Image (cartoon, rainbow, N blue to C red):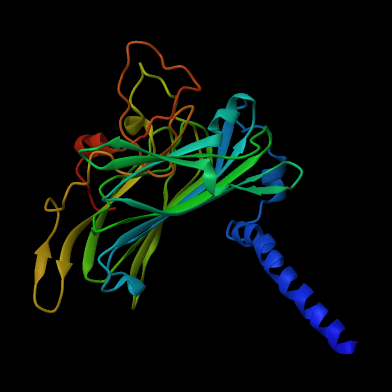
């Protein structure tokens, strides 16, 4: 009898453990995002822009250039992006769909997202909420659209992903600005010791970009820049383009040095395909990193229209020459 009970208990345990592991998966993914603060939960309007439909609470980028630290010997560079956005009005609910443009050159990896409801419940973005479509057969570019679940006023949308590309060049600026207010934005560039890089930044609309002195280690050196309380850049088809008004920062490798030679790199880098990766929302094309210059249209675009993959290629053509920063 005791042997039967022991066998029965083992069977029940074997059945329960896999179920517990499945239930733990969403919690593990949720733990990858910073906890939501009381201030973020209670925010209902943005000072100075009380009619903003949504707000980017933070967006962070980390660029690991090929050859930095653990990347030594690896030909791929990485850009890791993490964004937190809050829906403030009914109009802002259109921001519940995010589109990430990528290509064979800039490959999308590891997208994770969740919706945090006002009552504290966390709903992960399911795998079937992602749709991939080809945007250019000749350039081999794609757009991955992600629809967040249970989007409502007061909800917080978290997402993160990684882009990998086989180049040391980061040819597009990192934009601190969005078409909605941004509470905090930062970019960290991590560069191997053999590479000397030049930084250039521009901050219209009285935005103050703070820069941290480069920290050097055996792995390489890192440069950090951030901005707080960045005002929205209006999505006006008749006004100046986004790239002229947005606070931004650009990093370009200028030279490579090893024990045998020193080689100048500025002006020799490969150009990325026309549809560099970016992230947009359905309503207004906000990006977590970079976006292309808007084309002027004969009539204003209606809010809530289909997602417009944004790239940034024209920004490369029109930007001023980088200077040491």
The percent position of residue 249, horizontal first and vertical second, equals 34, 46
Position of 138 with respect to 248 (left or right) is left
Quarter-of-image position of residue 196 = bottom left
The percent position of residue 171, horizontal first and vertical second, equals 25, 48
Residue depicted at 80% across the width and 82% down the height = 7
| Number of marks present in the image shown | 0
Q: Is residue 231 above or below residue 91?
A: below
Quarter-of-image position of residue 115 = top right
Q: Is residue 1 above or below residue 308?
A: below
Residue depicted at 45% across the width and 51% down the height = 186
The percent position of residue 107, horizontal first and vertical second, equals 33, 52
Quarter-of-image position of residue 91 = top right
Residue depicted at 70% across the width and 42% down the height = 117
In terms of depth relative to the viewer, which is nearer, 139 or 258? 139
Position of 192 with respect to 62 (left or right) is left
Residue depicted at 87% across the width and 82% down the height = 5
In terms of depth relative to the viewer, which is nearer, 136 or 325? 136
Q: Quadrant of the N terminus?
A: bottom right
In terms of depth relative to the viewer, which is nearer, 185 or 208? 185
The residue positioned farthest toward the top in the image shown = 299
Residue 165 seen in render:
yes
The percent position of residue 108, horizontal first and vertical second, equals 38, 51
Residue 53 seen in render:
no
């Amino acid at each position: 009898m005791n042997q039967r009970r022991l066998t029965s208990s083992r069977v029940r345990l074997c059945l329960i453990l896999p179920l517990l592991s499945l239930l733990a998966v969403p919690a593990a993914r949720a733990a990858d995002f910073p906890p939501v603060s009381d201030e973020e939960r209670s925010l209902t309007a943005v000072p100075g822009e009380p009619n903003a439909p949504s707000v980017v609470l933070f967006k962070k980028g980390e660029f690991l250039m090929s050859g930095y630290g653990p990347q030594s010997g690896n030909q791929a560079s990485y850009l890791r992006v993490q964004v937190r956005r809050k829906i403030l009005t009914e109009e802002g609910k259109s921001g519940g769909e995010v589109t990430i443009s990528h290509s064979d050159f800039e490959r999308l990896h590891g997208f994770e997202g969740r919706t945090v409801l006002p009552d504290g419940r966390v709903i992960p973005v399911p795998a079937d909420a992602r749709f991939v479509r080809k945007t250019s057969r000749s350039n081999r570019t794609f757009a991955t659209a992600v629809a967040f679940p249970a989007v409502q006023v007061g909800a917080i949308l978290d997402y993160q992903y990684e882009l990998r590309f086989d180049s040391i060049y980061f040819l597009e600026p990192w934009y601190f600005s969005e078409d909605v207010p941004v509470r905090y934005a930062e970019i960290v560039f991590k560069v191997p010791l053999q590479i000397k890089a030049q930084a250039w930044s521009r901050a219209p609309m009285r935005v103050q970009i703070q820069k941290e002195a480069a920290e050097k280690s055996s792995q390489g050196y890192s440069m950090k820049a951030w901005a707080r309380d960045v005002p929205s850049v209006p999505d006006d088809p008749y006004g100046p383009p986004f790239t002229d008004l947005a606070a931004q920062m650009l990093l370009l490798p200028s030279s490579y040095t090893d024990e045998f030679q020193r080689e100048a790199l500025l002006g020799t880098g490969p150009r990325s395909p026309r549809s560099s990766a970016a992230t947009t929302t359905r309503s207004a094309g906000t990006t977590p990193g970079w976006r292309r210059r808007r084309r002027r249209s004969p009539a204003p675009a209606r809010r809530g229209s289909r997602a417009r993959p944004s790239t940034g290629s024209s920004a490369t053509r029109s930007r001023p020459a980088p200077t040491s920063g």
